[in-house]
Amino acid sequence: MTRTADDPIRVGVLGARGRMGDEVCRAVDCAPDMVLVAKVDDGDKIGEVVDAHAEVVVDFTHPDVVMANLEFCLANGVRCVVGTSGFDTARIDQVRQWLGDEPELGVLIAPNFALGAVLTMRFAQLAARYYPTVEIIELHHNRKADAPSGTAAHTARMIAAARKDAGLGEIPDATTSAADGARGASMDDVRVHSVRLSGLVAHQEVLFGGDGETLTIRHDSLDRCSFMPGVLLGVRKMVQRNGLVVGLENLLDD
Ligand SMILES: NC(=O)C1=CN([C@@H]2O[C@H](COP(=O)(O)OP(=O)(O)OC[C@H]3O[C@@H](n4cnc5c(N)ncnc54)[C@H](OP(=O)(O)O)[C@@H]3O)[C@@H](O)[C@H]2O)C=CC1
Ligand SMILES: O=C(O)C1=N[C@H](C(=O)O)C[C@H](O)C1
């Protein structure tokens, strides 16, 4: 279907009964320039998004199913805004391959849609070159499916790239662990510690250490509404943009 600027964006939501999906359905319902045309959860047929002529699908499902969802949407001409975690370099390359050399569809994969989380990652990337040591602590509700968080993995990747550009070597660490996991997981050679507690939503600290000083950058999502402006921005941008975008930061200054 061809769209005019006045047409509301037809949005489908995958994972619609989940914590994030439910919030996204409400945000889309309240957006004057969007219409919610399909709500799909586990056990429903994903083909509903095609039958309903969704232009953009928002996926907040599970790392185990998101790739199949993406493959289906792209094969059926539906643009995608993806919040689901679990995207490593291999998955990102696969999505790029599905889109092809001259993409006619757009996909946004955003490890975190909260403005403060995006800024935390940018600030961490800026600070990384100046400090010999850095570790990440991510803290989430205890019903989260995966660890470490997608945001922490992305932050570690950004820090590792900045350290490499600055010619910094391995992070010095003289500790011998007496218990498995005591030093967290190594993501791109950056230590990531995952805390899971009821009562939490989504939080992250990036700790830098130098000579006689530390710098801590912390972000807290206290409510899932913190993700909604980013999700809606992603939908508005990706309805008209082709190709793969990884990270909301790449759409903020457009
Ligand atoms: N990028 C970001 O800013 C954010 C990303 N996330 C990520 O989003 C994902 C979802 O998080 P959250 O909402 O808390 O998780 P939930 O478990 O609350 O929601 C996921 C929903 O997806 C459903 N589902 C499972 N498989 C399918 C499928 N094949 N098709 C459609 N729906 C399916 C689940 O159903 P059932 O329970 O029956 O299996 C569930 O209702 C996670 O990967 C999380 O890390 C979360 C917050 C912010
Ligand atoms: O599961 C969550 O809740 C979140 N998941 C994303 C992640 O894995 O980074 C984003 C945010 O941290 C909330």
Image: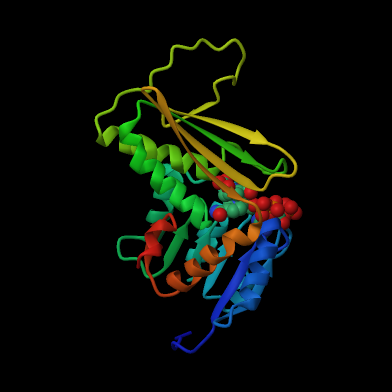
Q: Is residue 105 left or right of residue 87?
A: left
**Residue placed most toward the observer, 170 or 80:** 170
Q: Where is residue 57 in the image (x, y as percent from the top left)?
A: 56, 68
Q: Residue at x 65, y 73 (%)?
A: 38
Q: Nearer the viewer, residue 240 or 112?
A: 112
When the figure is inspected, residue 12 is found, relative to residue 92, above or below; the finding is: below
Q: Position of residue 9 (x, y in %)?
A: 53, 79
Percent x, y for residue 72?
Answer: 54, 62
**Which residue lies at the image location 50% right of the left edge and 64% below the top edge?**
80
- Residue 197 vertical position relative to residue 179 in the rendered view, above or below: below
- State whether residue 62 appears in this view: no
Residue 73 x %, y %: 53, 65
Q: In which quarter of the image is the C terminus?
A: bottom left
Query: Residue at (52%, 52%) from the top-left corner?
Result: 112
User: Which residue is drawn at the image coordinates 41% and 32% (left, top)?
Assistant: 188
Which residue is the extreme one toward the front? 212
Is the image coloured rainbow, by chain, by secondary structure, or in one colour?
rainbow
Between residue 226 and residue 23, name the one nearer to us.
Answer: 226
Is residue 182 shown to the viewer in this render? yes
Q: Quadrant location of residue 179?
A: top right
Count of numbered badges drawn on the protein:
0
